[in-house]
Image: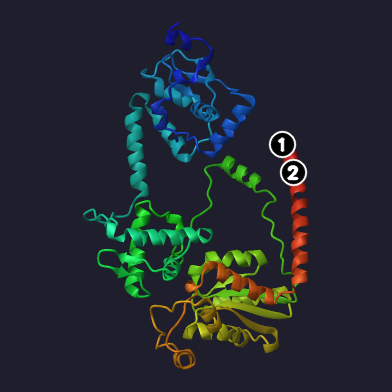
Amino acid sequence: MTATDQFRQVGIVHRDSIKPSPANDSVYRPPQPDDADIQALAASMIEVGVLEPLTITRDGFILSGHRRYCASGVAGIAELPVIVEEITSDSPDFMNRLVTHNKQRVKSIAEVAAEAVVEVSAADAHRDLQQYRVQRSNAAFKATPMELGHRRFRSEISPQKADFLRAAIEVLERLRDFWPVSVRTVHYQLLNDPPLRNTTRRLPYANDENSSKDLSNLLTIARFEGLVPFEAIHDPTRPVTTWNVHRGAGDFVRAEVKGFLRGYWRDLLQSQPDHIEVVGEKSTLTPIIEPVCMDYTTPLTIGRGYCSVPPRKAIHDRFRKSGKRRLVLVVLSDHDPDGEQIATSFARSMRDDFAIPSTQIAGVRAALSRDQVHAMKLPPSDLPAKAGSSGYRAYVEAFGPRVYELEAVPPVDLQRLLREAIESVLDLDAFKEEQRREREDALELDVQRQKALAAMRL
């Protein structure tokens, strides 16, 4: 039996004998194996089979069923039911027939418009579709493109920097549980066992600006060369905003069902007599501080120095809403003139600006104190205390000109210090009781979730 004879039969055909129509991609979005809808369709095929036959031409090209064909590949199904139409892929009427077979599809606005172009003139469909795409692109893109100039290529990492790179990668591997980390955090960890920045020139890594810049450049090149994962390093001083969008209602419903009754957080501090908040000076440390705050459900405010009015007002509002007797601020700041002031002045400014009585506010410093600096033998910053700081003179008189940054603290130790500070102001028995009740809540919610999902399947 020839391939043509086989296709003239209405029945089962091997998947390898069927070909997606290239013209389909000029009208509709091509189905992708990793698309959530395709994955769901493949799962259904594995369970109940291919319920609706594909419609194909006499020479084996798909008129209707590109999504079913794609899903069958994901499902590993080799034999597919087909209906053969008396038409070939090179027929002048092929495009019209293709669109007719897909009238029932849920389509995007762009696909509907592309269909309309095909139906206006089947003979000129391809040309008209191309013109439509150009028009749509031109309509959407009204800006004047910038002149990019000549292409520039980043320098490669020289063999002389191999030891330097190896040491930086070893630090990142040790910090993997805290990814993404800042370059500054890697810098301080390298100071524990300084490598050579350049083996030929015998330049040792040091606690100075040149070494820090050299590390930043090295890690930038290493990420583009695939030697260091992009997700290992972040720069929280340049935030990015994206939106949780979906390709269609089906994708959204699946995501909602998967997360149904799974977003529960019990307020583990509701039984505490005090309202507790954590304030951090450095946004670069958020990935390290945030998991600890999550464990205790303590709000976290990153001040990046002195907090502006809106974050402080939000802290005040949460405190008043809590109805608790006292606001307790757990502060993390550098050991420098500004950091020393933040630890005490933040609570003072909250008291004064929002008329909170002194008996209803308290500040606790989790880090970084001079005793902690000595105990952990932290290296000083490569820059001395800022002479322009309002607390410069008092700081230098008390501690000298050297300053110490939070990034110098190993992440495990910083988390430990924060946990100790939070627990020092907690009623631990009440906290543990809330944890126990959260576990009970989670069990009950899972039972209710299963009941709801079962009802939805009816």
Q: How many marks?
A: 2
Which numbered dot is residue 129? none
Residue 345 seen anywhere in this rendered image of the structure: yes
Query: Image height check: is 91 above or below 223?
Result: above
Quarter of the image where one finds residue 356: bottom right
Along the viewing direction, whichever of 204 and 372 lies nearer the viewer: 204
Task: Answer few, some or many: residues within 10 Å of disc 1's Cα (few below 14, many 20 plus, some between 14 and 19).
Answer: few
The colour scheme applied to this rendered structure is: rainbow
Q: Amino acid at mark 2?
A: Gln
- In the image, residue 328 sits, relative to residue 183, either above or below, namely below
Residue picked out by circle 2 = 450
For residue 382, side relative to residue 174 (left or right)? left
Residue 158 appears in the figure? no
Q: Position of residue 301 (x, y in %)?
A: 57, 72
Q: Position of residue 228 (x, y in %)?
A: 40, 55
**Residue 438 appears left or right of 309:** right
Q: Position of residue 381 (x, y in %)?
A: 42, 78
Quarter containing the N terminus: top left
Q: Toward the viewer: 28 or 441? A: 441
Quarter of the image for residue 53 reads top right
Q: Residue furthest top?
A: 1
**Residue depicted at x 36% and y 56%:** 222
Does dot 2 land on a helix, a strand or a loop?
A: helix
Q: Give the residue at x 62% y 84%.
A: 354
Q: Who is closer to the viewer here, 376 or 133?
A: 376
Q: Which mark is residue 457?
A: 1
Relative height, residue 406 to residue 111 (above, below): below
Residue located 70% across and 84% down the image: 360
State the CA–CA distance, disc 1 to disc 2: 11 Å
Badge 2 crowding class, 10 Å Cα cut-off, few under 14, some 14 to 19, many 20 or more, is few
